[in-house]
Image: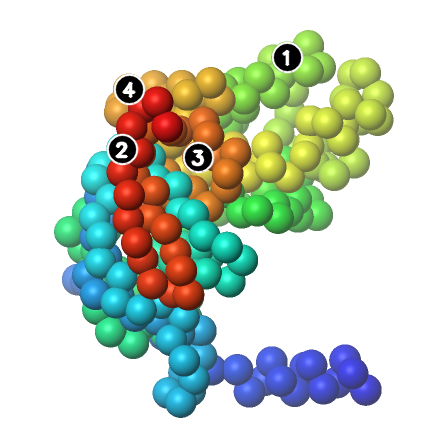
Amino acid sequence: MTSVERVLDYCSLDQEPSAQVPSDFRPPPSWPSHGEIVFNNVSMRHSTQTYLPLDLHHISMTIRASEKVGIVGRTGAGKSSLIQTLFRMGTLVDGQIKIDNIDIASVGLDDVRRRISIVPQDSVIFTGTMRSNLDPFTDYSDEEIWHALEQLAYFKLHGHKHAPTDEIASTRRFYRGRTETSRTCIPEVVAWCRAMINSNSQLTVKFIFLLIGGSGNFIPSVSCIGFTITVGGTAPICFNGYGVFYRLGSDA
């Protein structure tokens, strides 16, 4: 009965806005090409119930293109909520979020969520092939996928540069056995590669991989490890949904 109760709860969830907007209002195919993010007096709650407290309170900040940002705060302070607003998750009560000078509230959910990539804290490999995990919409060639994999030294693990991308990701038997399969297909690596092959959300993290032909895009990080790698950026400090902002030097 618990399962039935959960299904009934899901049926009563608030519906999201339209996934698509008229073609006249869609952003350019190259959006976002620079990666500047502007939060202007943003307030958000995860529910549409107006009597519930806000999860973010009047956040205003600008993340410049190519800037590395670490979001710091205790559990429940609002770090993940801030990231979720970029994907139009939750209810924007007040304010405006612009990415490359386009208000994301005017962009369909399909465009917002396909053109921005995230490496979540708990990454997942879906049942299926490596290609279906990295390129679910078949937008890229094998060469482009392998270029991204090469940046993560993927092929060096099994000594074969151009293994097929259509083998099952979760059960693939690499050339040195089962142990290497689990090492090669860890969800975090797949998530990084999935973000890399999205040409509109290129990342440049020193010591992890190099970007070819550009200066990179923004990297907002709520991971201590991620921010350690990209020190020298701005550190928004979250406290109960409020923002207190600091700028760290290169020796921080």
- Mark 1 in CB contact with mark 3 (< 8 angstroms): no
Give whichever of discs 1 and 3 has the lower sequence position. Answer: 1
* Dot 1 amino acid type: Lys
From the image, tell me which residue sits under label 4.
213
Give whichever of discs 3 and 2 has the lower sequence position. Answer: 2
From the image, tell me which residue sits under label 3.
227
Q: Residue at left 84%, top 26%?
A: 178
What's the coloring here?
Answer: rainbow
From the image, tell me which residue sits under label 1.
156
From the image, tell me which residue sits under label 2.
66
Q: Residues within 10 Å of mark 4 (few under 14, many from 20)?
A: few
Q: Is residue 28 visible?
A: no
Q: Which of the two residues, 208 or 70, is positioned nearer the viewer here?
A: 70
Give whichever of discs 3 and 4 has the lower sequence position. Answer: 4
Of tags 3 and 2, the one toward the viewer is 3
Q: Disc 4 on helix, strand or loop?
A: loop
Q: Residue at left 45%, top 52%?
A: 73
Quadrant in which residue 233 is drawn: top left
Q: Does residue 172 appear left or right of residue 86 in this picture?
A: right
Q: Disc 2 on helix, strand or loop?
A: loop
